[in-house]
Image (cartoon, helix red, strand yellow):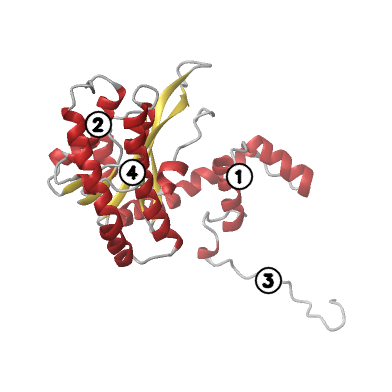
């Protein structure tokens, strides 16, 4: 007999909607899976420590074997998002690309690491994609970029020059951050001359700072560059040509190498000195992957 006011019939639990769980039959909801992914792959907390944290802090027994199984079941869904992002980024007309090395733990050689690479592409305002590969050849760059046609901003790595020659729809843009570094390295040997270039490049950066702080639209930024940056670029180009012809500046000197580096970038296919854009600070400062921790 049931309690007064209650039906003696057994309690029936409604079936869980299939779409409620990413992993059918698992108790893990989306929020828990996201927490585990961020903890392990962004905060670099291994599963055995997450297991200890859940047990100590929440009194919950969550074994690392279970978490490993959940991650394996979640990967196909993450791959779909990754592929969608990769497709979306390449639909625009402008991409930034860079690559940086990381230490990879070699399973065949216990206790030793080898060099591998993270390739990164960014379409400002549309996201960032990381691509891991053991190599750094132009073949990897071709895989990352796929059939992309448009403006590609990169450093002076030869693989990008190779791509621009193979793909007529690709216009290569160089980076003022890398140009500036070459002249900075020439300060000790060619102080006054190298310093002049650094001061002119600083003027270009000030124009970009003005545009950014004023939150200018793309059209307004372009007009500002034509007004203020174009005369600076013309002055730099004239000085580059003049200094290259000076007998006192040897091609093998740090300044000579900086001049040749800059002119070589401006001679890239479909490029001119004016296309050496000031690189977005995000890419030049924040895209570098932490190389102090070996990657598994």
Q: Secondary structure at mark 4?
A: helix
Q: Which mark is residue 10?
A: none
Residue lying at the far right in this picture: please name it: 4
Discs 4, 2 touching: Cβ within 8 Å: no
Q: CA distance from mark 2 to mark 3?
A: 79 Å
Q: CA distance from mark 4 to mark 2?
A: 14 Å
Q: CA distance from mark 1 to mark 4?
A: 45 Å
Q: Earlier in the sequence, mark 2 or mark 1?
A: 1
> Would residue 101 be visible to someone looking at this image?
yes
Q: Quadrant of residue 53?
A: top right
Badge 4 density bin: few <14, some 14–19, many ≥20, Cα 10 Å: some
Residue assigned mark 3? 12
Residue assigned mark 2? 259
Query: Which of the two residues, 4 or 184, is positioned nearer the viewer here?
Result: 184
Residue assigned mark 1? 39
Q: Earlier in the sequence, mark 4 or mark 3?
A: 3
The residue shown at (24%, 31%) is: 259
Q: CA distance from mark 2 to mark 1?
A: 46 Å
Position of the N terminus, as image quadrant, is bottom right
């Amino acid at each position: 007999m049931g309690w007064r006011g209650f039906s003696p019939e057994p309690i029936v639990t409604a079936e869980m909607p299939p779409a409620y769980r990413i992993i059918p039959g698992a108790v893990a909801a989306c929020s828990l899976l996201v927490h585990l992914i961020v903890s392990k792959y962004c905060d670099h907390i291994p599963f055995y420590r997450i297991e200890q944290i859940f047990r100590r802090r929440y009194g919950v027994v969550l074994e690392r074997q279970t978490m490993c199984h959940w991650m394996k079941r979640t990967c196909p869904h993450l791959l779909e998002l990754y592929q969608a992002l990769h497709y979306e980024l390449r639909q625009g007309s402008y991409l930034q690309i860079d690559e940086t090395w990381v230490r990879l733990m070699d399973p065949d050689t216990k206790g030793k690491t080898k060099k591998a690479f993270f390739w990164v592409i960014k379409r400002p305002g549309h996201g960032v994609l990381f691509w891991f590969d053991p190599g750094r050849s132009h073949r990897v760059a071709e895989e990352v970029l796929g059939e992309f046609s448009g403006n590609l901003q990169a450093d002076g790595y030869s693989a990008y020059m190779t791509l621009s020659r193979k793909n007529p729809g690709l216009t290569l843009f160089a980076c003022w951050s890398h140009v500036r570094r070459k002249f900075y390295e020439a300060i000790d040997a060619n102080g006054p001359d190298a310093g002049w270039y650094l001061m002119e490049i600083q003027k270009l950066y000030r124009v970009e700072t003005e545009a950014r702080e004023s939150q200018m639209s793309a059209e307004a930024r372009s007009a500002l560059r034509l007004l203020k940056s174009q005369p600076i670029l013309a002055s730099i180009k004239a000085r580059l040509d003049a200094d290259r012809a000076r007998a006192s500046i040897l091609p093998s000197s740090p300044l000579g190498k900086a001049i040749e580096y800059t002119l070589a970038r401006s001679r890239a296919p479909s490029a001119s000195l004016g296309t050496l854009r000031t690189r977005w600070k995000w890419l030049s400062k924040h895209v570098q992957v932490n190389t102090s921790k070996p990657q598994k």
